[in-house]
Image (cartoon, coloured by chain):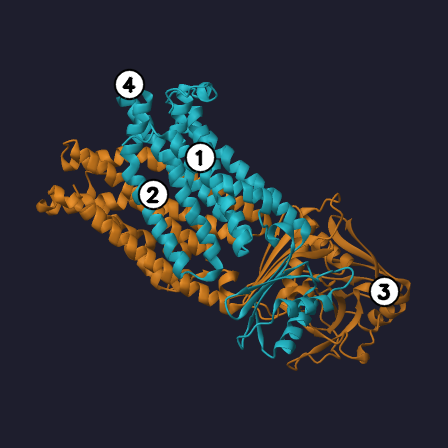
Chain colours: A cyan, B orange
Amino acid sequence: MNIIKNRYLYFGISLLVIIPGILALIFWHLPLGIDFTGGSLLEVKFDQGVPLTGEEVSAIYADFSVPNAVISNPVVQPMGNDSLSIRSKVMTDATKSEIVTSMEDLSGSSITVLHFTQVSAAVGEEVAARAAGAVALAAVAILLYITYAFRGVQHAFRYGTAAIIAMLHDVLVVVGVEAILGYYLGWEADSLFLTALLTVIGFSVHDSIVVFDRIRENSGHYKKLKYETLVNHSIVQTLDRSINTQLTVMITLLALALFGGASIRHFVVILLVGVFSGTYSSIFNAAPILVVWENKEWQNWFRRKPSTAQ
Amino acid sequence: MTRRPYLMLALILVLIAFALWIDLSNQVTIMNPFNQQAIIDRNVSIRLGLDLRGGLQTLLEADLPPDVSVSSDDLGVARQILENRSNALGVSEVIMQVAPPRRIVAEFPGIDNPDEVVASLQKTGLLEFVDMGNERPAPGTVIQTDFGQETSAQPTIIPTTTVSTDTSPTETPVDTPTETPATDVPVIYHTVMTGTALDSVAVTQQTGQYMISFTLKSDSKQLFSDFTGSHVNQILAIVLDKTVISAPSIDSQITDGSGVISGNFTQQSANDLAIQLRYGSLPIPIKVVESRTVGPTLGAESVQKSLFAGLIGLTIVILFMGIYYRLPGFLADLALIVYALLTLMLFKLIPVVLTLPGIAGFILSIGMAVDANILIFERLKEELRAGRTLQQAIDLGWSRAWPSIRDSNFSTLITCGILFWFGNAFGASLVKGFSLTLALGVLVSLFTAITVTRTFLHVTLDNIKSAEHPRWFGL
């Protein structure tokens, strides 16, 4: 099996997933939840089963909107058959109680408040900034660790960089998929999404390291071997492990997605996408990048005749 | 270690027995056999997070301009007062933590009146001076007063001279009989005046003793003078939000509206009391910047579903390992069960507050626990194919797989650490819970993969010769 030979094909497959995601990010933006933007999220269950329509809810919100707390035009989304998720600007707790009472009056059904979350805009912005910092910090810490762990190998820094590129690949895949799903399913990126993203980062690097570790070991044994061959051999040797580990993690995640509660489905689906991407990128991106780097192939990228690379 | 698998096996069995004991009990008690005293008496029931049992989580912030710095002392005092306040509301298991530089995270599990709680957190505290007669309540006692009850609560503010105290209980001259009947069950004490009567409060030091000096606003001087005049040697309690914070006795009449409170104060305790007097309540204004309410029904449903999902996931993984890796796979399954038992034990002992993402982190860590075993078994198979003997292959498999297990898991731990830091800064207990359970899972899985599976494998091979057939290793 020669994975390295087809490396540009695999890079292409990655781009096929990433580019639509980036386009979605540009045109639709990442739908940020109130954890990052600030605002109010009210999730209610109509005990008698028939929820109000979006217009009816909007009308009630408009009634309680006052100049210094404008909450008209809430975003109303059904959750299942009997529940609504309503997003608006921040309101007082008293207003919330009155709104719930009004909804009960109008619908003739008692209402259970499943969730009520309010985040002030300032906190939201701070969380968003801190989240970006957390991702950047994770990347730097991991880069340093890999460079340290591979200090015995030539060009240890390349391994760290390749792992980070593969990691960025996974971040782009996950964020892009979130933007696309956000557009079609109304999902919003909240702090759980961020948790999923950071986990994917950890997992992605985890996978890359396993492949790199084999390269590290083999490069001690087969000094005469061409670097390309060495890397390919290492990938193939670890392939069983990569697939099996991915299978077990995907099985547990799939079980969670299918049978776990609705409240973590979003979280789990993002993890599924990320874990798959993480394994793919460690095999088909991270290790091949080392070869591209070793051959300095970018010197040939823009020549008329593509050389050895293809 | 490889040469002494039986010793390891014994240790592992002891550990499993201990884990089972913890996992199956809600209360752990160890008695001292000599004097029948409990050495350890701990509640080890599983703690569920707010998202699972319902409740309210709020993030409170100092309501000051961003360029005004908030001292950590002020924040600490505010936290203490808020906690007293919520306890006075009858909310149990309140968790309040200072999140520097200017926030406090408050969690109220299982409450059904979030609106009321939020309102009480934001209100300014009520400071009262209460006539206790000859009764000296211990600080922290919750009492009822007549202030705000009805119109009769007309405070008799009586200035006096020196109020002397002991913040340390016990001795004070108890004299006169009293007009306050301290016998009846719900005693309602009379509020002499409230914190609004205070003009200024300062900590002073005389001959090495810390005291708190105060002056009253002019319209309260007469009232205080009258009261202290007629209640000399009785107790005038300082009460914040119906909780006694200090109970000085009146030494003599205070006519000019200024007096001192003396007692066995340290600088710290004098400052604390002065702050409480000065601000009536909170040393800094507080606003709610974030609040999350979760209904209890949603939580219960989530727990059941997630546990069910976890069980299904675990079962499939166990089947997969057994079928694909045969004998070592089966032993790894046993190790996986040990892993689950140990992790649960740690959750209960530490204790880890379980949140929904926390459960997800735990289930994800099952997948990662398997990974270490898979790495080793793939290695083991390779060594067997290369013609090594089984014992050699086992040891080589472990030692060669170790660097990749170490490095990959360490990078996961790095991410966990960063997640934990992120969660801590915002009281985002969901994120924190996830990172904590995942990190614990990774650490325990390292232990089981390295120690438990290997010991099981050695012991099995020692005893069952036919187990050495390559078929049992999926070759």
Measured in 3D between alpha carbons, the distance from the residue under mark 3 to the one under mark 1, in whole angstroms, is: 77 Å
Point out which mark residue B446 bears: 2
Q: Are marks 3 and 1 in contact (CB under 8 Å)?
A: no
Coordinates of residue B74 in the picture (x, y in percent)? 70, 51
Measured in 3D between alpha carbons, the distance from the residue under mark 4 to the one under mark 2, in whole angstroms, is: 32 Å
Helix or strand or loop: what does disc 1 sit on? helix
Q: Quadrant of residue A224?
A: top left
Mark 1 against mark 4, which lies toward the viewer?
1
Mark closest to the chain's N terminus, 3 or 2? 3
Q: Chain of mark 1?
A: A
Vertical placement of residue B387 versus B420, above or below: above
Q: Are marks 3 and 4 in contact (CB under 8 Å)?
A: no
Q: Quadrant of residue A234?
A: top left
Q: Which residue is mark 1?
A: A166
- Three-letter code for the amino acid on which mark 2 is drawn: Leu
Q: Chain of mark 2?
A: B
Do tags 4 and 2 sit on the same chain?
no
Point out which mark residue B254 bears: 3
For this view, does B406 lie left or right of residue B380?
right
Pointer 2 local density, CA inside 10 Å: few below 14, some 14–19, many at least 20: many
Coordinates of residue B467 in the picture (x, y in percent)? 12, 46
Measured in 3D between alpha carbons, the distance from the residue under mark 1 to the one under mark 4, in whole angstroms, is: 26 Å
Q: Quadrant of the N terminus of chain A?
A: top left
Q: Is residue B58 visible?
A: yes
Q: Residue furthest front?
A: A304
Measured in 3D between alpha carbons, the distance from the residue under mark 3 to the one under mark 2, in whole angstroms, is: 71 Å
- Three-letter code for the amino acid on which mark 3 is drawn: Ile
Q: Quadrant of residue B377?
A: top left
- Three-letter code for the amino acid on which mark 4 is drawn: Lys
Q: How many marks?
A: 4
Do tags 3 and 2 sit on the same chain?
yes
Vertical placement of residue A231 versus B390, above or below: above
